[in-house]
Image (tube, rainbow, N blue to C red):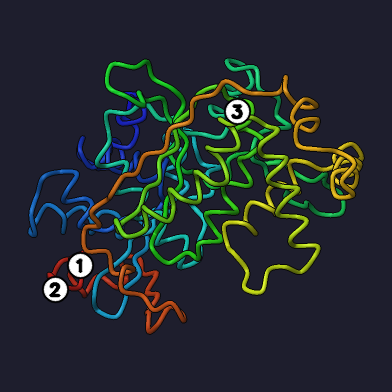
Amino acid sequence: MKIPTEHIERIKSLGYTESEARFLYIVAVFSGYFTLGQFRVFTGSRYGKRASSFAQKLLKQGHASVRDYMRRGSIFHLFSRTIYGQIEKDNLRNRKKHSFDFMRTRLVLLDFILANQELAYFETEQEKVCFFCDQLGVSKDFLPAKVYEGSSRCQPTIRYFVDKFPLFLASPLSGAPPVVTLSYVDSGFEAPSHFVSHLAAYQGLFRQLNCFRFLYIAAKQAYFEKAEERFRSLVKRPLESDVSSEILRYFEIRRKWDNHEYVIPVTPDLEFLNEARRRFHGDKFESLYQTWHLGELNERDLRLEFSQLRPERAVFFHTFLVHPHGSPLAVASRHGDGCMKDTNHRWRHGSRHPEGDAKLLGA
């Protein structure tokens, strides 16, 4: 990544070293949360004075807060408008407090960024929108978006790429030119439906791209096989195959569903059915379905109807296994946050040395 020199110098003016300033820039842009374990990986340091001094400066100046989790580790939250203002990103939502699930995901995301610093990321919403709309000619209507309702006097605000997962250009194969790479970060605690919902939110954009790569980022390799199956079923096969085959499959599954033939629900079929309902809706498809269902439209005629809609696309799916650096959130209960003490302390809690307990701050 290319970090503007002037931004590093501005952070350094607050009393941080060169490496500390670079680390804070990365945290501010991509995560908002970090552990001292991640700082040590970034700087190549070990337990000792370096990380301790860094933590003390952050807390003393009120640039970050720290949350202790069951004496397994601590999570730092970089929230100060002063830091974000120095890099002209004081409106980033990373400054705000977030849920436990958000923190888990952001720590895994940060591990990925630290392991892949050579990539040129699209860092902000504006950069991503400009890339797709101005360079690729994609309409904003096809971008993943979320509407935020304002006050009674304010108009709703539309925000794009609110998940803030890594987005960059990379080669899908050795020797091949780089293509746009979109991603999903699995912290290990989300339900499979979250990934399906994420893919659904991006379907409009996927269909506008002739070639793209999707990267599934997770802390456990066990998630990769199911993720690839879902991606192939919901994205890769529909985009790379003859559209008429997808419509025919949709009609067949829909007929079975309408006839109550599913004694035990088949998850891949139902996931495909839900996505197909969104893709193939409208009077034309409804009329074709009813005609086909009555036996008045055979497979050959149906395929001829859509014979000109065969896309020429190349869709790549890859995975990336991150190695969490002792994140205390990795052991959190699925039934709640457990016994977590949110110290949110500034320097007034300085009696506890930020690295006095190696296990406590081992994250």
Question: Which amino acid is tagged 2?
Answer: Asp
| Most distant residue in the bottom direction | 339
Distance, label 3 to label 1, CA atoms, is 38 Å
Mark 2, residue position: 357
- The reply to whether callout 2 and callout 3 are in contact (CB within 8 Å) is no
Distance, label 2 to label 3, CA atoms, is 45 Å
Please indicate whether residue 132 sits to the left or right of residue 184 in the image.
right
Q: Residues within 10 Å of mark 2 (few under 14, many from 20)?
A: few
Mark 3, residue position: 129
Q: Which mark is residue 361?
A: 1
Element at badge 1? loop
Query: Percent x, y for residue 69?
Result: 32, 75
The residue sitting at 44% across, 52% down in the picture is 227
Question: Which amino acid is tagged 3?
Answer: Val
* Nearest to the observer: residue 232 or residue 170: 232
Element at badge 2? loop
Query: Percent x, y for residue 357?
Result: 14, 73
Front position among marks 2 and 3: 3
Q: Quadrant of the N terminus?
A: top left
Q: Quadrant of the C terminus?
A: bottom left
